[in-house]
Image (cartoon, rainbow, N blue to C red):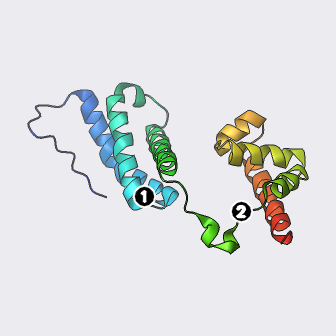
Amino acid sequence: MVVSTVMIGAGPAAPEQDGFEAFYRANVDRLYRALAVTLRRDDLAAEAVAEAMARAYARWPTVSRLDNPAGWVFRVGLNWATSWWRKVRRERPPADDSAHPHLRPPDVAVARDALARLPEPQRAVITCRVLLDLSTAETAAALRISEGTVKSRLARGLAVLRHELNSED
């Protein structure tokens, strides 16, 4: 991704602008690639980088003093993309799955019973991640466990639920 950094009609740059321009040139491609891999959409990654860099520029005196300004920009871009996805999900309801019987959602009572049979730690993680739509980090903070533990409990719990809900047929 190549983005022009030339400002038309601009006079001599202030020292903080020079610092931001150097930061931008050194990091924009790397941040774009990281977000493209994370988001799996090049167009969304480009918008996220542009938005995050604009926010970094607006707060450059503060951002430049951070230990890892590129990490801050990455996180801002990722947060922006996550917000974008949530907005899209709210605006576009999911397609009606009734035309696809193999995609029929499980009976609510059966799903609730299967969830109740899980060990409490797995049930708590699934509740936070799936029902409350918390991020892995937010779930880890809420339950006071590590992010790795959140991921493993979620994977194991969902595997058990899939198996139980598919064997009910």
Mark 2 in CB contact with mark 1 (< 8 angstroms)? no
Q: Quadrant of residue 162?
A: bottom right
| Residue at (40% x, 25% y) in the render | 62
Q: Which mark is residue 33?
A: 1
Q: Tell me where residue 92 appears, x and y as whole percent.
A: 48, 53
Left or right of residue 73: residue 111: right
Q: Is residue 27 left or right of residue 122?
A: left
In the displayed image of the protein, which residue is found farthest to the left? Answer: 9
> Which circle's residue, 2 or 1, is located before the other in the chain?
1
The residue tagged with tag 2: helix, strand or loop?
Answer: loop
Q: Which residue is mark 2?
A: 105
Amino acid type of the residue tagged 1 in the rendering: Arg
Identity of the amino acid at label 2? Pro
Question: Left or right of 166: which side holds 45?
Answer: left
Question: Which of the image's four quarters has the N terminus?
Answer: bottom left
Q: CA distance from mark 2 to mark 1?
A: 36 Å
